[in-house]
Amino acid sequence: TQLLEQSPQFLSIQEGENLTVYCNSSSVFSSLQWYRQEPGEGPVLLVTVVTGGEVKKLKRLTFQFGDARKDSSLHITAAQPGDTGLYLCAGGVAGTASKLTFGTGTRLQVTL
Amino acid sequence: DTAVSQTPKYLVTQMGNDKSIKCEQNLGHDTMYWYKQDSKKFLKIMFSYNNKELIINETVPNRFSPKSPDKAHLNLHINSLELGDSAVYFCASSQFGGHYNSPLHFGNGTRLTVT
């Protein structure tokens, strides 16, 4: 069974701070997606990374896929209250009929 | 226009009852899914249909039965509801079923509470 462990589980920071969320596994994934979920809503895709070592930026968010494709990180620069939410990583493996394995989640709260 | 819509948003029912959740997507996607999110926010796949054909059936009790009348609709029927079925159920769709990097588009969830 493939598992994706996210750390930290909870993070409460003040506006303007930087933070990093980690997504780790002992398994190799063909792709890694990051989603953000707000209360009462479904997860929304932020980014997909598919190449080992790949770095993608989305405004103040920087995503990296590990060289061995077993881990990923999400770095947020100068966090804002609008970044508050549940961040989920999800790994996909080629040939597994599009089944994604979701991570354990990181709940981020950014206060003024 | 809502891309993936599911109804109802909230469902409160007693143990032993039978209930259904409906889902519709207007994105033209080929693949639809049911996910269950527990109280710890862990999201786990239950079923997946590609063009009305069941392609993923995780270890889910037989009391759960999905039905896809066409590729835009995927319903979930639950028989003999138990307390442990309480969770948020999400419907999702993706454009390329079978592609490991296909992004999922989720509905806003159905919060099921079994008393």
Image (cartoon, coloured by chain):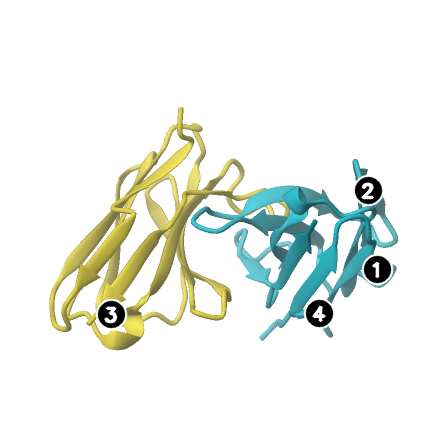
Query: Residue B10: x and y, percent?
Result: 27, 52
Label 4: few (<14), some (14–19) or many (≥20) C-alpha neighbours in 10 Å: some
**First along the sequence among labels 2 and 1:** 2
The amino acid beneath tag 2 is: Lys
Q: Quadrant of residue A107?
A: bottom right
In this picture, residue B78 sits left or right of residue A15: left
Q: Nearer the viewer, mark 1 or mark 4?
A: 4
The mark closer to the camera, 4 or 2, is 4
Q: CA distance from mark 1 to mark 4?
A: 18 Å
Identify residue for label 4: A8
Chain bearing mark 4: A
- Disc 3 and disc 1: Cα gap in Å? 39 Å
* Colour assignment, chain A: cyan
Look at 51% across and 35% down and name the residue there: B95
Tag 3: residue type?
A: Asn
Position of B7 relative to B61 (above/below): above
Disc 1 secondary structure class:
loop
Q: Which residue does the numbered mark 1 point to in the structure image?
A: A66
Mark 2, mark 3: which one is toward the viewer?
2
Badge 3, how many Cα within 10 Å: few under 14, some, many 20+?
Answer: few
Q: Which chain is yellow?
A: B
- Residue to which mark 2 is pinned: A56
Q: In this rendering, which labeled residue sits more in front, label 3 or label 4? A: 4
**Residue carrying label 3:** B62
Q: Earlier in the sequence, mark 1 or mark 4?
A: 4
The kind of residue tagged 1 is Gly
Q: Is residue B111 left or right of residue B63?
A: right
User: What x and y, as percent, mark residue B103?
Assistant: 58, 42
Mark 4 residue element: loop
Residue at image location 66% in from the left, 50% down from the top: A33
